[in-house]
Every structure is written in C-alpha cells, then in structure tokens.
C-alpha cells in the first residue's frame, strides 16, 4: 500500500470526525473529542499535538454496498475545514462483499469510515476508540505504523474483526478495510442497539395507560384470582408468550413495519432479513420491558390490596408468595393485550422513531418518497381512455 505523505517536523495534527447527529455516532463522536487526543499521543506519536474536531451532521445515506458518497463528502469537508485527516462515524450497516464492513480507509485522500453496527452491542466505545487509532495510523503515518498499531492492539478487538486489503475496488484506491468474519449476528446485535429498544416505552404511553387500567380491573376481580391459582406456571408462561407475541405482531402489521423486497433498493436487499429481524427483536425487547414493568407494579399492588384472609378461599387453605406471583403474572399477561389495542392511539411517526435508528428512518423515508414518485410517474404516463 502507498504511504501517505508524512508531516515534516513536530506540530499539531487535526483529526476531523464527522458523525451522524443522533444516537451512538453522536455520543461516541463527542466522547472521542475529549479522549482521542491523549490516546493518539500515547499509541502513535507523542511528539505531535493531536487535536480532534467533531462535527455532527447528516451524512449521505449511501447504501449497504456503496458508501463512497459519504467518503467524498468527508474529503470535501476536510479540505474546507483544513483538517489533516477525517473519519466518518455512521450507524449505516455496510457490507464488504458478504462480510459486514467495520472500517474503510482512503489514504490518498486521508479519509476513513467507521461503521458502528458491525461492532455488535457490547463494549462499543472501547472498540471504536481502538479502531479509530488504527485508522488514523494508516491515514497519517502509513503502513508501517498501522501494522504496529494493529499488532499492538490485537487483544483489544474481537478475533473475528480483521483488516484486509482490496486493491480491486478502485484503481486509484490503495487502502485497507476492516471486516467482521461470520459477523451477521454481531451486525444484527449492533442494529438492534442502534434502534434503542428502550425508547419504545415512552412511545407507547397510550398503550401502557390502557394496560394499567385493565390491570386495576383484574386485580379486584376474584375470578382472575381463582383462575390464576388453577393455572400452573407452564401455562402462565405460555399465556405471557402469546400476549407478547400478539402485541409485537399487532405493532408490525398495524404500523407497516415489515420490510418487503419490492420496496427497497436492490443494493440493500442483502440486508432484508437482518432489517426485519432487527425490527422484531427491537419490538420484542421493548414489549418485554413493558411486561416486566407491569409485573412489578401488579405484584406490588396485589400484595398490598389483596388480603390473605380473602385470598385463602382460592388457594386450598394456604396463601404463599406463589399465589401473589400467579395473580401478578396473569394480570400482566392479560393487560398486554389491552396495551396493544391502546398503542393504536399513538402516531405512526412516534412508533417508527422509537423502533428505528436514524439511518433506518432515513432509508425508509427515501424508499417511500421513491415509491410515491414512481406511482406519480406511472399515473402521468397512463393514457386516459376516451369516453371514460
């Protein structure tokens, strides 16, 4: 690989970081502004003063196969800002052939790219920081320093993440790419993390309110107490599974969250299964969090409201903690159905914003605009039949 031109003498090196303006890219980008200069000085060259400037902006959407528009934007921004090199942080899932792309470099233009979903769901900040050091080493100091950094930091990254070179992508490119071997599960975990499942609860306030309202009715219903004691825990678990599944399916179908191949660009179709799997897992985690919250509240309410002297009539003469657990469990499982119905009062935009990452919302909005434009063109091109 061709060595980038070295900086003559000691001085200041300015590293620009362009990050998507939401969620993990923005959070990590801002954190790197404070942490990265010291790390670069320690691991690369302490004789320079390393400065990191972070800009949060909407990078071009690109695609899962072609992301060079994003890197072109970064190269122009580097020249305009006077940065020595620039790295993009994005939550766009990208593939390098069949493998998830973790990082890409363009030494000639001193531009790099780091894709967060391919890191998975755990230790994201540490892994991104280590990768950024290696990217900067290649873009600034060249192949020799990069190899030293990669070897030195080999224990800081999973074994499945590896650097590779590919001179066939572009006749004028001579960089390296980090890919994830067997990384589909890690990529899926990263996509779910970017979707931030915990945001689903605030987006379903109407559904949660409906669930609590029905819970209050069930908690004072002796028929529910009796049924809860008659059911064994295996049946109670099946009831909860059915309720959670029903709410997930309700949200997917009612909000048109299931992605179809006909609606997405051909270059994104390799991600179709992962996109839908990420949607299902995100919703599942959000609904399970809702179920856990309902269970804690209902169990506490049952213990406070239902006297043991009254409950003993439905428990074969003995009141145990398990009796209250059954009531709280059954009440919560039944209330989830009410939550699914109540969620219908939330706007589609609020639910999609809670379920999807910034990049996924951007991609879906672009797909919907393209579909509407295509229908409009077809309508204009259709000749009107005379006499009709």
Image (cartoon, grey):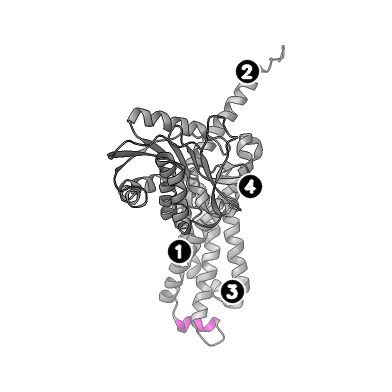
Residue density around tag 2, few if under 14, some if 14–19, many if 20 or more, within 10 Å: few
Query: Which residue lies under the disc numbered 4?
Result: 273
| Label 2 with label 1: CB-CB less than 8 Å | no
Residue stretch in magenta: 308-314
Labels 4 and 1 touching (C-beta < 8 A): no
Distance from label 3 to label 2 (Cα)?
A: 61 Å
Is residue 309 in the magenta section?
Answer: yes
Q: Going 37% across and 28% down the picture, which residue do you hit?
A: 79
Q: Earlier in the sequence, mark 3 or mark 2?
A: 3
Occupied quadrant, residue 98? top right
User: Which secondary structure lies at badge 4?
Assistant: helix
The residue that label 2 is drawn on is 380
Q: CA distance from mark 4 to mark 3?
A: 40 Å
Residue under circle 1?
Answer: 293
Disc 3 vs disc 1: which is toward the camera? 1
Question: Is 386 located above or below residue 68 in the figure?
Answer: above
Mark 4 touches mark 2? (CB < 8 Å): no
In primary-sequence order, the first of circles 3 and 1 is 3
Q: Quick one: label 4 or label 1, which is nearer the N terminus?
A: 4
> Which residue in the protein does label 3 denote?
227
Pick the front one: 90 or 385: 90
């Amino acid at each position: 690989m061709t060595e980038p031109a070295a900086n003559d003498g000691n001085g200041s090196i300015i590293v620009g970081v362009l990050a998507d303006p939401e969620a993990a890219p923005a959070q990590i980008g801002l954190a790197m502004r404070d942490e990265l200069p010291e790390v670069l000085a320690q691991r690369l060259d302490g004789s320079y003063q390393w400065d990191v400037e972070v800009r949060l902006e909407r990078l071009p959407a690109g695609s899962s196969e072609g992301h060079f528009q994003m890197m072109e934007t970064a190269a122009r921004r580097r020249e305009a800002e006077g940065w020595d090199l620039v790295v993009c942080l994005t939550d766009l899932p990208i593939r390098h052939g069949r493998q998830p792309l973790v990082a890409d470099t363009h030494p000639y233009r001193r531009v790099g790219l780091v894709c967060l979903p391919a890191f998975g769901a755990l230790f994201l900040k540490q892994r991104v920081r280590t990768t950024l050091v290696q990217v900067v080493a290649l873009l600034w100091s060249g192949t020799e320093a990069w190899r030293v950094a990669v070897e030195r930091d080999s224990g800081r990254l999973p074994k499945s993440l590896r650097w590779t070179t590919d001179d066939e992508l572009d006749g004028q490119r001579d960089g390296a790419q980090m890919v994830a071997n067997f990384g589909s599960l890690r990529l899926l975990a990263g996509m779910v993390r970017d979707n931030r499942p915990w945001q689903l609860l605030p987006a379903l306030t109407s559904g949660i309110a409906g669930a609590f309202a029905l819970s209050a009715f069930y908690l004072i219903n002796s028929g529910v107490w009796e049924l809860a004691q008659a059911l064994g825990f295996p049946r109670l678990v099946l009831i909860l599974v059915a309720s959670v599944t029903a709410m997930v399916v309700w949200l997917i179908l009612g909000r048109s969250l299931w992605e179809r191949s006909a609606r997405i660009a051909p270059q994104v179709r390799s991600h179709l299964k992962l996109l839908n799997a990420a949607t299902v897992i995100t919703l599942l985690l959000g609904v399970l969090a809702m179920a856990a919250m309902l269970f804690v509240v209902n169990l506490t309410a049952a213990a406070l409201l239902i006297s043991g002297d009254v409950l003993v009539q439905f428990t074969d003469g003995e009141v145990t903690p398990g009796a209250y657990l059954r009531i709280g469990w059954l009440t919560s499982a039944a209330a989830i159905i009410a939550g699914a119905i109540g969620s219908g009062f939330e706007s589609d935009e609020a639910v999609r914003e809670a379920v999807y990452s910034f990049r996924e919302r951007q991609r879906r909005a672009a797909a919907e605009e393209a579909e509407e434009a295509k229908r409009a063109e077809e309508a204009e091109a259709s000749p009107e039949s005379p006499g009709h």
